[in-house]
């Protein structure tokens, strides 16, 4: 029997075009050689040697170029289609660049309505302003407001009072009415999970921290931050740790260190760092996870420390049931229990306060 012949180029390109139209919501923000563009159309012109074309708009100009040269946000449907197309072409996947390599998309006037509540994702915090992006997009704006317990990666609800542009950068002013943590809507690529043996209930896993492109720079900054903490240079340590989160919000060690740094004095700030770190790890290690993440596997420690810190922070907020649930999860993830979560859980169930549980009040 003669095996079926592989599809020709025209057929494959038509399939990829249909996939792009079905999965990529257009218009969509993207980058071309580091410049922000809006992709309005993806098409196959019928010429196999031309391939797939993306129609891009930048400013008042519209032009077409190969879809293989368009960079969509990591983890988006557009990025998945481009990766598949580049693989078919025999090209390597696009390597994510650092935060300073590409110019950010800016919020447009029509994106925000004064007086209407708007959800923003915090990217960076200053004393009187928050650099944010619109939830569900990559478009950035600076919010002038009183900064309190917001952290990078938190989602805030703001009712804008005023909107303006200065030096071609958009600004809004308004008060933050609520802050929440929800890693599932941040567009993050989940951390990889590796089984150390054959998968089965109770198997040992390793939660990989980050892929190489951003890992080296982040690790160097984390080491420098730890040295600053050891020397009690806390302001310098915080600056380095926030820079790590600017490189990649998935650095769990940075969330852990910032949570531990603020636990004694700024309980809410610490809680949010621990919450976000656990939420990011939970994108990979969900509630239905039936393996173990032992402390002896070094890559697992940032998540385990974050979960332990979350329980401590919840207890300081008198959320005893939530703290107990976090400790039970910690014991399930690492039954060897090097962090003594079972003992803390028993103390909580016995009615002890966080002051009685902490070694140093």
Image: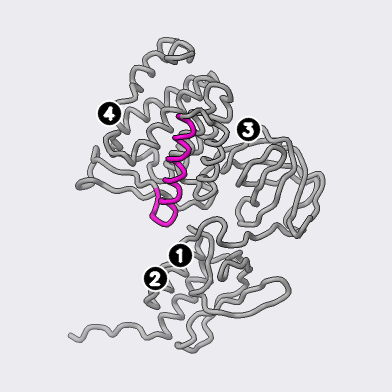
**Which label belongs to residue 335?**
4
Q: Say if mark 3 contacts mark 2, CB within 8 Å.
A: no
Q: Residue furthest left?
A: 1
Residue sitting nearer the eye, 52 or 297: 297
**Residue at the image point whose x is 39% and y is 13% from the top:** 347
Q: Which residues are magenta?
A: 210-230
**Number of residues whose C-alpha sits closer than 10 Å to that of mark 4, classed few (under 14), some (14–19) or many (20 or more):** some
Q: Which residue is mark 1?
A: 80
**Which quadrant, please, contains the N terminus?**
bottom left
**Circle 4 sits in a helix, a strand or a loop, which is it?**
loop
Label annotation for residue 149? 3
Could you tell me what secondary structure mostly forms the magenta stretch?
Answer: helix
Q: Marks 4 and 3, Cα distance to the nearest angstrom?
A: 34 Å
The image quadrant of residue 272 is top right
Identify the image quadrant of residue 325. top left
Left/right of residue 241 with respect to residue 38 in the rendered view: left
Residue 92 has which mark?
Answer: 2
N-terminal-most mark, 3 or 2: 2
- Quote the CA–CA distance across marks 4 and 2: 41 Å
Secondary element at tag 2: loop
**Residue visible at 43% across and 73% down in the picture:** 85
Percent of width and height locating residue 5: 28, 85
* Helix, strand or loop under label 1: helix
């Amino acid at each position: 029997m003669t095996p079926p012949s592989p599809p020709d180029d025209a057929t494959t390109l038509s399939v990829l075009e249909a996939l792009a139209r079905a999965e990529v919501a257009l218009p969509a923000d993207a980058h071309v050689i580091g410049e922000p563009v809006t992709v309005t159309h993806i098409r196959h012109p019928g010429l196999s040697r031309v391939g797939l074309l993306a129609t891009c708009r930048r400013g008042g100009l519209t032009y077409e170029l190969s879809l293989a040269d368009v960079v969509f946000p990591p983890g988006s449907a557009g990025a998945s289609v481009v990766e598949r197309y580049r693989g078919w072409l025999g090209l390597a996947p696009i390597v994510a660049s650092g935060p300073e390599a590409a110019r950010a998309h800016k919020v447009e006037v029509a994106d925000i309505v004064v007086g209407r509540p708007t959800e923003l994702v915090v990217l960076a915090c200053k004393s009187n302003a928050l650099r944010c992006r619109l939830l569900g997009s990559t478009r950035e704006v600076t919010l002038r407001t009183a900064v309190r317990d917001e952290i990078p990666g938190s989602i805030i609800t703001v009712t804008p009072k005023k909107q303006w542009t200065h030096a071609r950068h958009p600004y809004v002013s308004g008060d933050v009415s609520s802050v929440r943590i929800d890693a599932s809507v941040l567009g993050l690529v989940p951390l990889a999970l590796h089984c150390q043996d054959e998968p089965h209930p109770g198997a040992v896993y390793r939660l990989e921290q980050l892929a190489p492109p951003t890992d080296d720079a982040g690790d160097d900054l984390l080491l420098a931050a730890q040295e600053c903490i050891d020397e009690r240079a806390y302001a310098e340590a915080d600056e380095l740790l926030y820079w790590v989160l600017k490189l990649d919000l998935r650095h769990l060690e940075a969330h852990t260190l910032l949570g531990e740094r603020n636990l004694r004095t700024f309980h809410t700030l610490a809680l949010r760092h621990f919450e976000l770190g656990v939420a990011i790890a939970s994108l990979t290690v969900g509630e239905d996870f039936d393996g173990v993440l032992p402390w002896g596997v070094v890559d697992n420690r940032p998540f385990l420390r974050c979960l332990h810190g979350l329980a401590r922070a919840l207890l300081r907020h008198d959320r005893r049931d939530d703290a107990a649930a976090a400790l039970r999860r910690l014991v399930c993830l690492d039954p060897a229990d090097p962090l003594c979560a079972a003992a803390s859980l028993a103390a909580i169930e016995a009615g002890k306060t966080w002051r009685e549980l902490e070694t140093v009040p």
